[in-house]
Each structure stands twice: as C-alpha cells, then as structure tokens.
Amino acid sequence: MNAPDYAAMLEVAIAEARQGLAEGGIPIGAALFHRDGRLLGRGRNRRVQESDPSVHGETDAFRKAGRQRSYRDTIMVTTLAPCWYCSGLVRQFGIGTVVMGESVNFQGGADWLREHGIDVVDLDDGTCIRMLGDWIAAHPEVWNEDIGED
Ligand SMILES: [Zn+2]
C-alpha cells in the first residue's frame, strides 16, 4: 500500500475550517480517514454555530464516521493540534495516526500522544497557521473560551 497522501487529506479538513469561518465559527476542521484513503467522516468546530462546546472538529468528524470496528488503521486529520479532549478521544478509541495542519497557534496534546505511541505528523501548513492565527487575533475571547482558559 502506498503511503497515504496526508496533504490531500488535510485539504478536506481545511475545507471544513473554511466552511466554519463562513458560518461565523472558529475555523478548525477535521476528517477521519482509513489508511487506504477512504474518507470516513468530516467535521468542524461548531462552538459558535450550535452553542455547543463539545463539537470540536475531531469529535464532529468522529461522530459523522459512525461506528467503526477498529480505529487502529484510521487517521485523524485536523487543521490544528488536538486539544486534551480530542487527544483523549484518539487514545480512547486507539486511532493509530494523527495528522495535524499546525501546532503553532496551539500545541494541545501532541507530545502526550507521541509519548503513548501514536504516530503524530505535523505538516506545519502555512494556510492553517494563518487562517486560525488571524481569527484568534480578531476574537481572543472566543478562543480562550474554546481552549478552556480564563
Ligand atoms: Zn478538541
């Protein structure tokens, strides 16, 4: 099997983030793929849109994917390093690989996931860094709410 095309997978997450931005939400998107390239589910942060702090990009994509027999061969692709809540989800369900667009605006649980044997890939993508960085600069209070900072 060829190596998965992480950059192409990230494009799906970026499209979700852009849709969230267009809806007035926090521009963070995610997608769950199988290693064979199949898209299982995609989603975005909808804290603002749904007034629901539990809808992060990763949890949304995870729920949209429905039940999976095993997560070992799945890849969680997200525009931003997963927070503690989503890092917990990755470990709880044994998702084998996490691909993140960036960890500049937020580091989350990336190191913790690596320490526990999850394959973590940081694409250090300029589009992701700028899109969320610009948004945080314009909406610092909503951002602090999202990451649980007072
Ligand atoms: Zn999260």
Image (spheres, grey):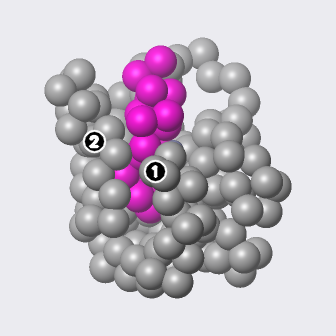
Which label was assigned to residue 84? none
| Residue under the image location 27 percent in, 65 percent down | 104
For the point 41% across and 22% down, the residue is 91
Give the image location of residue 75, x and y in percent: 43, 40
Neighbours of disc 2 within 10 Å: few (<14), some (14-19), many (20+): many
Q: Residue at x 43, y 43 (%)?
A: 83
Amino acid at dot 2: Ala
One can see residue 6 in this view: no
Q: Secondary structure at mark 2?
A: helix
Q: Residues within 10 Å of mark 1 (few under 14, many from 20)?
A: few
Q: Which residue is mark 1?
A: 149
For the point 23% across and 22% down, which residue is it? 116
Question: What residue occupies the far left of the structure in this picture?
Answer: 115
x then y, percent, for residue 45: 63, 56
Query: Residue 117's quadrant in the figure?
Result: top left
Q: Would residue 82 be counted in the magenta stretch? A: yes
Q: Amino acid at mark 1?
A: Glu
Residues in magenta, as a range: 74-92
Answer whether residue 27 is magenta in the image: no
* Label 1, label 2: how far apart the Cα atoms are: 18 Å
Q: Is mark 1 within 8 Å of ligand 1?
A: no
The quadrant of the image that shows the N terminus is top left
Question: Label 2 belongs to which residue?
Answer: 110
The x, y position of residue 66, in whole percent, is 72, 30
Q: Is residue 31 above or below residue 88?
A: below
**In the rendered structure, which disc, 1 or 2, sits on the residue that comes first in sequence?**
2
Q: Is 104 displayed left or right of 7 in the figure?
A: left
